[in-house]
Amino acid sequence: HETQLLSWVLSYDGERTCDPLAITASAAALWLSDVPLKKPVAAAMVGYVDGRLVMNPTLEQMEHSRLHLIVAGTEDAVLMIE
């Protein structure tokens, strides 16, 4: 089942990056399809602003962040840290 997924942004509020949403949407599409997928995957952006970790920070917050992480995983395990 060799599969390639491409994500296109059709609407964007300009507040946050679309990368984590693209990962989550791609996993949801696979989960609903006939492609074998054992568990659904979700992703989130993590920043470090004013001494605090911030989940899904805005682009403005990311300008001041000392950390730029995208974390993806299932309910049971972390699959990717970028």
Image: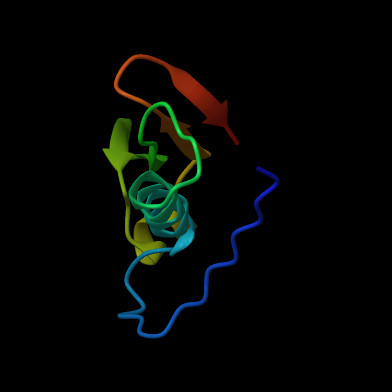
Camera sees residue 41: yes
Which residue is situated farthest in the top direction here? 76
Where 33 falls versus 81 (above or below)?
A: below
Its colouring scheme is: rainbow
In the image, taking residue 3 as reference, residue 78 lies left or right, namely left
Q: Residue at x 51, y 38 (%)?
A: 69
| Percent of width and height locating residue 11 | 35, 85
Q: Residue at x 43, y 63 (%)?
A: 17
Name the residue nearer the viewer: 69 or 66: 69
Camera sees residue 64: no
Where 28 falls versus 75 (above or below)?
A: below
| Percent of width and height locating residue 80 | 55, 29
In the image, taking residue 13 as reference, residue 8 lies left or right, namely right
Name the residue nearer the viewer: 6 or 45: 6
In the image, taking residue 2 as reference, residue 38 lies left or right, namely left
| Percent of width and height locating residue 64 | 44, 52
User: In which quadrant will I find the C terminus?
Assistant: top right
User: In which quadrant will I find the N terminus?
Assistant: top right
How many tags in the picture?
Answer: 0
Which residue is situated farthest in the bottom direction here? 10
Which residue is situated farthest in the right direction here? 2
| Percent of width and height locating residue 16 | 36, 65
Q: Residue at x 49, y 36 (%)?
A: 36
Name the residue nearer the viewer: 5 or 79: 5
Which residue is situated farthest in the front direction here? 34
Q: Residue at x 70, y 46 (%)?
A: 2
